[in-house]
Amino acid sequence: MALKKETTLLNRFNDFNEKNPEVYELFKKFTFQAAGKGHKRLSAWMIANRIRWETQIETVNDDYKISNDYIALYSRKFMKDYPQYDGFFQIKEMKRV
């Protein structure tokens, strides 16, 4: 009997991100836009909901079903990729990854 590989939240996020790179591109675009307008801190949920708005209301593209579970991981990825924005998103300890 083969053991099933455990699917962690991080594994699911990485898989989603790999299959949907446009989501992270939008996350970066809207975050840079907000920072460019002078925001020093912002909610990652606000960015995620802007992505949802743009992809479900403003465009005719397929809907991106962004799990709420991924929002914290996108904010962490952004701040890791762009350390000059460390602290832009408030983060809390994640109980499950």
Image (spheres, rainbow, N blue to C red):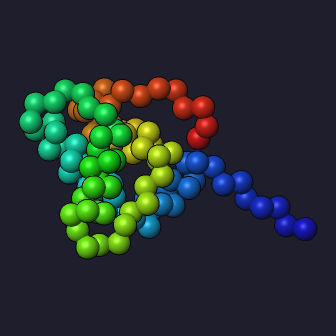
Q: Is residue 93 above or below residue 70?
A: above
Res. 75 image quadrant: top left
- Number of marks in the image? 0
Query: Outermost residue, front direction?
Result: 57
Quick check: 1 left or right of 38? right
Res. 36 image quadrant: top left
Q: Nearer the viewer, residue 25 or 61?
A: 61
Q: Is residue 89 above or below residue 53?
A: above
Q: Residue at x 90, y 68 (%)?
A: 1
Q: Quadrant of the C terminus?
A: top right
- Residue 92 on image: x %, y %: 47, 26
- Residue 85 on image: x %, y %: 25, 33
Quick check: 54 left or right of 52? left
Query: Outermost residue, right direction?
Result: 1
- Residue 3 on image: x %, y %: 82, 61
Residue 27 seen in this snapshot: no
Q: Is residue 68 above or below residue 7?
A: above
Q: Residue at x 44, y 67 (%)?
A: 19
Q: Residue at x 60, y 31 (%)?
A: 95
Query: Outermost residue, left direction?
Result: 37
Q: Nearer the viewer, residue 68 or 33?
A: 68
- Residue 14 on image: x %, y %: 49, 55
Q: Residue at x 55, y 48 (%)?
A: 10
Residue 18 seen in this snapshot: yes
